[in-house]
Image: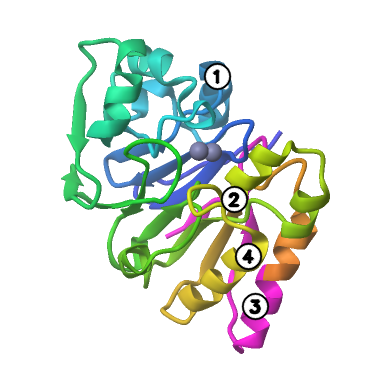
Amino acid sequence: MRSFFWEKTMTYYCTLASGSSGNCSVYVSGRQRILIDAGKNARYISEQLRHLGLGLADLTHILITHSHSDHVSALPVLLKHSGAALVCSWDTYSTIARKLPPDAPKLLFEEGEHFLLGDCPVRTFATPHDAPGSCGYVLGAGREQVALCTDMGTMTGEIFEAIRGSRAVLLEFNHDVEMLKTGPYPYPLKRRILSDQGHLSNAFAAKVAARLCGTGTSHVILAHLSAENNRPQLALDAARQALEAEGLEAELILAPRDGLGTPVLL
Ligand SMILES: [Zn+2]
Ligand SMILES: [Zn+2]
């Protein structure tokens, strides 16, 4: 089992799970220990945090991107046992509020707002996805900045402006279009995934990754890969080819479905 020891002064970002079976990651900077999404059970999340030398009680905030169960399933239990404050959009909160402890501390925002969590700057942006209030985040500033972009059917100019220049970007490489089209999913689900409110394909995300690397991004974390409609090598090849076509280089990191990803030191 992998185990890490982190200096208290380190800033880093690490995925704990990624894909339709559950999404969760952590951003640690200064006194802020921020969990992003909670789409696994609490025991799993607590075990992965332990590999990073963290416990549930260390979490200061839990950021939620949207209300789909692969992003929120452990949220009620985590809020009960961690003492962390919930941070999500008003519309996301309205969708999930009845499952949550009513007295949990929370910070609610409109998509597009900026704010501070302790000394950590946070920018939010609306994501085109079929969940009310769905949004992404940019955490930190300067060379410590990481952008989180999953569960979105397309890339908008507004999102690109919000995330450009981020040192690390978590980017959805959900599916290979041919695998999805010829695969076993029922037609309405295929149509949903391919729509502008669905998920990003390898080819689309690869182009976005290359554009981002042109703005200073040095680490691209390939995330939310479909188990049925994608293969890690296809996603990595698409990203590598798009970068090579532009004469760019970046570290490509695959976020594993289960278990800790490779931590990105910021
Ligand atoms: Zn998802
Ligand atoms: Zn979703």
Whichever of labels 4 and 3 marks the residue nearer the N terminus, that label is 3
Q: Secondary structure at mark 1?
A: loop
Q: Amino acid at mark 3?
A: Ala
Q: CA distance from mark 4 to mark 3?
A: 12 Å
Whichever of labels 4 and 2 marks the residue nearer the N terminus, that label is 2
Q: CA distance from mark 2 to mark 1?
A: 19 Å
Q: Which residue is mark 1?
A: 41
Circle 1 crowding by C-alpha within 10 Å: few under 14, some 14–19, many from 20: some
Q: Which mark is residue 242?
A: 3
Q: Secondary structure at mark 3?
A: helix
Q: CA distance from mark 1 to mark 3?
A: 36 Å
Q: Is mark 4 within 8 Å of ligand 1?
A: no
Q: Which residue is mark 4?
A: 252
Which of these two is toward me, 93 or 163? 93
Q: Which residue is mark 2?
A: 223
Q: CA distance from mark 4 to mark 1?
A: 28 Å
Whichever of labels 3 and 2 marks the residue nearer the N terminus, that label is 2
Q: Which residues are magenta?
A: 239-266
Establish if 198 lies above or below 221.
above
